[in-house]
Amino acid sequence: MHDSDRNLIEAHLGGQAGAFETLIGRHGPALLGYLTKMTHDRDHAEDLFQETFVRAHERARQFRGENLKPWLFAIASRIATSGFRRIKRHAAISLNRPVLCADGVHCQTLEQTVADRSPGPDARAQLEEKRQKVRQALGKLPAKQRSALILSYYHQMTYLQIAKAMGCSVGAVKTHLFRALKKLSALLAEPAGGLQ
């Protein structure tokens, strides 16, 4: 039988050994991936990962939902983005705008470039180079924009889930995504992807 997150939290609160470890095993890999993408530093991400689960353990009685993932990502987002400043407002761009194409023919859209899809064998090296440029550009985004973009595209979370994870409104999530995509597009449109 597959225990729900709610059942595992209740078991943990009741002192059942292994319940919290099961939750870490269930949600840990995605959370660590998110934090690694946010920080671009595996060691720092692991520290934030541990802090996230320590806080989740300490605040387990406050969990009210059925799915622990948005709640964990909310804790992680607050930890990862604390201290970052807000940025100026930018205009929207289309996810279908071509990026990273020198020849003007073999172009990918921003959505295709950001999405983590497995390439065919013949395009693996070229796609990995593009992904590296995208990762570097992501690192230049302000923390809240980067967080919203990673949660949306890499973790396939809905606007509502992202809002809960980031502790903001759905409108703010849309604004963060809007700004992130514009800035990412500008960085990737510059020569050499806008990266030195």
Image (tube, grey):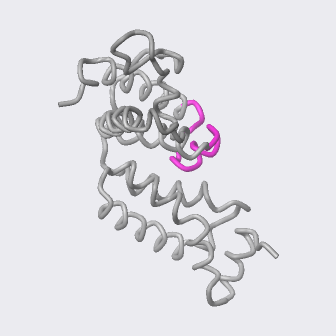
Vertical placement of residue 111 versus 161, above or below: above
Magenta stretch: give its range: 157-171
User: Could you say which is closer to the camera, residue 158 or residue 115?
Assistant: 115
Residue 64 location in percent, x, y?
A: 69, 63
**Residue drawn 70% across the image and 76% down it:** 8
User: Could you say which is closer to the camera, residue 104 or residue 195?
Assistant: 104
Residue 195 location in percent, x, y?
A: 22, 29
Main SS of the magenta part reads: helix
Left or right for 135, reference 26: left
Image quadrant in which you'd find residue 91: top left
Vertical placement of residue 50 versus 17, above or below: above
User: Is residue 70 located in the magenta-colored stretch of the structure?
Assistant: no
**Residue drawn 29% across the image and 56% down it:** 41
Vertical placement of residue 166 versus 111, above or below: below
**Residue drawn 57% across the image and 43% down it:** 162
The quadrant of the picture occupied by the C terminus is top left
Left or right for 164, reference 53: right
Vertical placement of residue 106 versus 153, above or below: above
The quadrant of the picture occupied by the N terminus is bottom right
Left or right for 182, reference 26: left
User: Could you say which is closer to the camera, residue 162 or residue 63?
Assistant: 162
Give the residue at the far front of this rendering.
Answer: 122
Give the residue at the far top of this rendering.
Answer: 104
Residue 112 location in percent, x, y?
A: 52, 28
Give the residue at the far right of this rendering.
Answer: 1
Q: How many marks?
A: 0
User: Is residue 168 located in the magenta-colored stretch of the structure?
Assistant: yes
